[in-house]
Image (cartoon, rainbow, N blue to C red):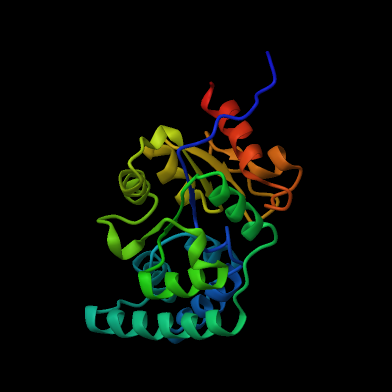
């Protein structure tokens, strides 16, 4: 088979938390604090089950672990408190992961739109987008802008719609299994970069570590993404 020269994808969609910014530890702080408010600290294994999910999913896991029932008013209060805590942590500590800005800049130079696709609600997503660089992105689809959170495909379909492309012509970078699952269901080419080195990507998704030699964006440019897109889309 001839070596691929790299067919440019129509658009590239990036998850935010854990993919472009190292925010999962910050979400972890707030999640453990939430579980303690409910009466029982999560185990590390249960914390893993909240990664890439929505607040309702996180609250359900914490409440079930504590053996408590949370009414709607309390859930709303806890949500506001948790998001305020995460916002403070974002302002204090958030930085883009190595190589992210270089890749985004190269995609912009190549005329390939980059879109944020994140379960995080818009006010918190905006803080993370600003930490990376708002000018790099053509758009952002957040968890409060679609009917269903990941692992549903909704936000990937919406991102494709906004860029005027078919999902099959778009590449998605995702760290969570939930996000990979939604992107695959949407029909996108998916490249996974789970934080846990022992975790493999969702079946059907490629592993950034195998493609790039490490689960990092260091050294990745628009041409290399095109080569991977060629290979993974079967062209």
Give above or below for 77 relative to 151.
below
Q: Is residue 51 visible?
A: no
Near-viewer residue (169 or 5): 5
Give above or below for 7 relative to 171.
above
Q: Is residue 17 left or right of residue 187?
A: right
The spot of residue 124 in percent (x, y) is: 43, 74
Give above or below for 235 relative to 162.
above
Q: Is residue 91 left or right of residue 38?
A: right
Q: Is residue 180 visible?
A: yes
The spot of residue 145 in percent (x, y) is: 28, 61
The spot of residue 116 in percent (x, y) is: 45, 57
* Quarter where residue 8 is shown: top right
Name of the residue lying farthest toward the right:
213
Task: Give me the residue at 38% from left, 37% from top.
Answer: 167
Q: How many marks?
A: 0
Task: Give me the residue at 38% from left, 53% from top.
Answer: 150
The spot of residue 188 in percent (x, y) is: 44, 37
Give above or below for 26 relative to 153.
below
């Amino acid at each position: 088979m001839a070596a691929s020269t790299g067919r440019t994808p129509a658009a590239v969609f990036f998850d935010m938390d854990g993919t472009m910014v190292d925010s999962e530890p910050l979400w972890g702080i707030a999640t453990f604090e939430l579980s303690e408010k409910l009466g029982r600290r999560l185990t590390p294994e249960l914390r893993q089950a909240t990664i890439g999910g929505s607040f309702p999913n996180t609250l359900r896991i914490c409440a079930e672990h504590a053996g408590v029932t949370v009414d709607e008013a309390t859930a709303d209060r806890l949500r506001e408190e948790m998001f305020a805590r995460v916002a403070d942590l974002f302002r204090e500590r958030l930085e883009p992961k190595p190589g992210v800005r270089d890749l985004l800049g190269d995609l912009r130079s190549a005329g390939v739109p980059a879109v944020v696709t994140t379960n995080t609600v818009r006010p918190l997503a905006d803080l993370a987008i600003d930490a990376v660089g708002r000018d790099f992105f053509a758009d952002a689809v957040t968890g409060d802008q679609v009917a269903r959170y990941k692992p549903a495909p909704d936000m990937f379909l919406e991102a494709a719609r906004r860029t005027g492309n078919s999902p099959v012509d778009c590449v998605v970078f995702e760290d969570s299994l939930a996000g990979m699952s939604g992107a695959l269901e949407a029909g996108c080419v998916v490249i996974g970069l789970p934080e846990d080195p022992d975790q493999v990507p969702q079946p059907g998704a490629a592993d950034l570590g195998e493609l790039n030699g490490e689960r990092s964006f260091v050294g990745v440019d628009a041409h290399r993404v095109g080569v991977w897109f060629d290979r993974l889309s079967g062209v």
